[in-house]
Image (tube, grey):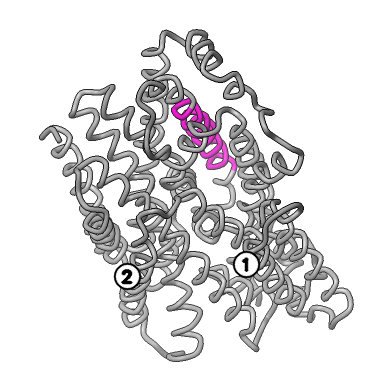
Amino acid sequence: MAMGTIFAFAIYLIGMLAIGLICYKLTSNLSDYILGGRGLNPAVAALSAGASDMSGWLLLGLPGAVYASGMNQIWIGIGLVIGAYLNWQFVAKRLRVYTEVAKDSITIPDYLENRFDDRSHILRIISAAVILLFFTFYVSSGLVAGGVLFEETFNLSYQWALWIGVLVIVSYTFLGGFMAVSWTDFVQGILMFLALIVVPIIAVNEMGGWDQLTDTVGQMDPSYNGVMTDMTLMGIISLMAWGLGYFGQPHILARFMAVRSPSDVPTARLINMGWMIFGLYGAIFVGYSGIAYFADNPLANSETVFISFVQVLFHPWVSGFLLAAILAAIMSTIDSQLLVCSSALTEDIYKAFLRKDASQKELVQVSRLAVVGIALLATLLAMDRDSNVLDLVSYAWAGFGAAFGPIVILSLFWRGLSRNGAAAGLIVGAVTVVVWKQLSGGLFDLYEIVPGFILCGVAAILVSKIGPAPSKTVTDDYDRTEASLRSGRIETAG
């Protein structure tokens, strides 16, 4: 490994830790630590949402899927773009307003409890349980990606690679909380964007241009060029259904809640969607180029195609920063997920049930300890070297999308959704994903987010219709939110 690559990597890691130290000085209470005091500007909110969303999956999982199967994997990208746009268009602004109206909620479980005036805390308990279950798998997927990166780049053992990645990520998340996570995500998002523009352009050029590349791939196997190759209607639905997941991802929804003002949402949406479209299709072209470039020496692990390109096409200094982009993608998601899990344990369990009178200083300390504990648990789950990044991500993505997605949408747009309806939907969505994942063959080959999303919505609506109606307090908050959206001013109770 050239010293230039190592030095470039070191500069990047030191920069991330420096941001953590700076944000440590700016963090004084739990709202600062969990939500950054609702002070994100549009650019930081947009790139932070994008970077925390895409993770190592964008630079390892997606290029690997295209390298292994060809252009039929493009349906994932189409579904994600549609889902992300709809999320920004219809959910972002309303959620930003409603979470402030609903007693200034700072987490999704907090929002659901306040939205439905749930004094039994049942929604908080169910939500926290879903978050801790699925984020453990999600964090593990990122750690697996980090292990692959360090193993391939520095010839470290997989276990050593895991612990190095955990140490760096936990350090700045532990110190600076949400603000550190958001600003590091901003830097990481820029780095990922540049990498996904530069690498496919150089790779395609090395193959003699786009026409030559498609000819070469077609001569190898024409099926690689077909977007419909081996695709069935169920297969297309399954791939595009990834877009449904956006409505229920707590780490993405947290960016909507933290944006500086509802009026900043359109600008943030434009920045995020531009970043996302170029990034997704850059990742697809990296995988597609790899089919031809590595034809004579096929890669043992398809998910290393981006890493392999960086190592063979670029000067060691440039290679170091491009490989840091992979680490950036991994870190930007894990840090956000650790913070959401931390908030679930601190705000939704510790403060709600164990220490209702805990000081702000105590809550921040508990949050930091929770970050360390969850990271250790996820590391133990990631010890399996044969784990597949895409498989782990798809399971967690489906779990959140099916459990929270319909409930978030209904809570924002339907005045008649009740607490019992929301609780039923959360349980049915999560359980459907867990059970469906264990089944296979025929209809059960459909991506589990589809049945989970549908059954969650149906359960929530049916239980709301047949059970007790929402209280006047709940409907008054809904009406206050609608008035705030029309007037442009947040109208709180009293």
Q: Could you say whether the residue bearing mark 1 is in a helix, strand or loop?
A: helix
Classify 356 as above or below 433.
below
The answer to whether 437 appears left or right of 342 in the picture is right
Give yes or no for residue 269 being in the magenta stretch.
yes
As for residue 353 lying within the magenta part, the answer is no
Label 2: state its secondary structure.
helix
Observer-nearest residue: 378 or 303? 303
- Which residue is located at x 70 percent, y 35 percent? 231
CA neighbours of label 2 inside 10 A, class few (<14), some (14 to 19), many (20+): some
Give the left or right position of residue 74, taking residue 310 as reference: right
Q: Is residue 7 above or below residue 309?
A: below
For marks 2 and 1, the one nearer the N-term is 2
The magenta stretch is: 266-287
Please name which of the two marks, 2 or 1, marks the residue nearer to the observer: 1
Q: Residues within 10 Å of mark 1 (few under 14, many from 20)?
A: some
Q: Which mark is residue 434?
A: 1
Could you tell me residue 77's position as x and y percent? 59, 36
- The quadrant of the image that shows the N terminus is top left
Identified by mark 2, the residue type is Leu
* Picture coordinates of residue 51, whole percent (x, y): 44, 45
Residue denoted by label 2: 376
Residue at horizontal 72%, vertical 56%?
444
The circle drawn on residue 348 is none
Q: Residue furthest left?
A: 3
Location of residue 475 by image quarter: bottom right
Picture coordinates of residue 392, whole percent (x, y) = 49, 56
